[in-house]
Amino acid sequence: MEKYNNFFKNVAKVVEAGLISSRDLKKEVENTLKFKIEEILTKLNLVSREEFEIQKKIIEKLQKEIVILKSIKIKKLNKKTKKAKKS
């Protein structure tokens, strides 16, 4: 919070001194906000929709493979138990 107070104090000093126009002030505030938004988004470690969709497809494929492998394992176990019962 202290950072923001300092920022506003500095802006107020510059405006009081008449060193920048309202247009310059607007650009400065926009740039500062854009920087903060990018910083927050970077910390959140977000991914693009395209990356998300690719990962989603990979997971779906792996889930199908797991189901297939489980069914193969169950078939093998069933064969072994049938052979054990016959013996």
Image (cartoon, rainbow, N blue to C red):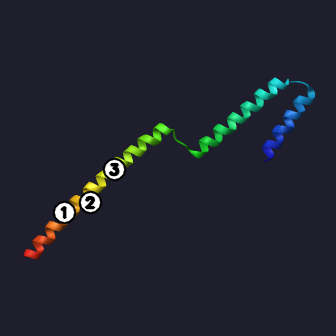
Label 3 Cα crowd, 10 Å radius (few <14 / some 14-19 / many 20+): few
Find residue 53 and report its image quarter.
top left
The residue positioned 17% from the left and 63% from the top of the image is: 76
- What residue is shown with label 3? 62
Q: Which residue is mark 1?
A: 75
Q: Camera-side residue: 57 or 19? A: 57
- Dot 2 crowding, Cα within 10 Å, few <14, some 14–19, many 20+: few
The vertical placement of 14 against 55, above or below, is above
Residue at point 14%, 68% (across, down): 80
Compared across the picture, whether 63 is left or right of 35 comes to left
First along the sequence among labels 2 and 3: 3
- Tag 2 secondary structure: helix
Residue for badge 2:
70
Residue 36 screen position, x and y as percent: 69, 38
Count of labels in the image: 3
Tell me, yes or no, whether the two marked residues, 2 and 3, touch with CB atoms within 8 Å.
Answer: no
SS for dot 3? helix
Q: Amino acid at mark 1?
A: Lys
Label 1: element kind:
helix
Nearer-N-terminus badge (2/1) = 2
29 or 67: nearer the viewer: 67
Quadrant showing the C terminus: bottom left
- Of the image marks 3 and 1, the number of the one nearer the N terminus: 3
**Seen from this angle, which residue lies furthest left?**
87
Proximity of marks 3 and 1: CB atoms separated by less than 8 Å:
no
Q: CA distance from mark 3 to mark 1?
A: 20 Å
Residue 56: horizontal and vertical position, in percent? 42, 45
The residue depicted at 83 percent of the width and 43 percent of the height is: 5
State if disc 1 and disc 2 touch (CB < 8 Å). Answer: no
- Left or right for 22, reference 81: right
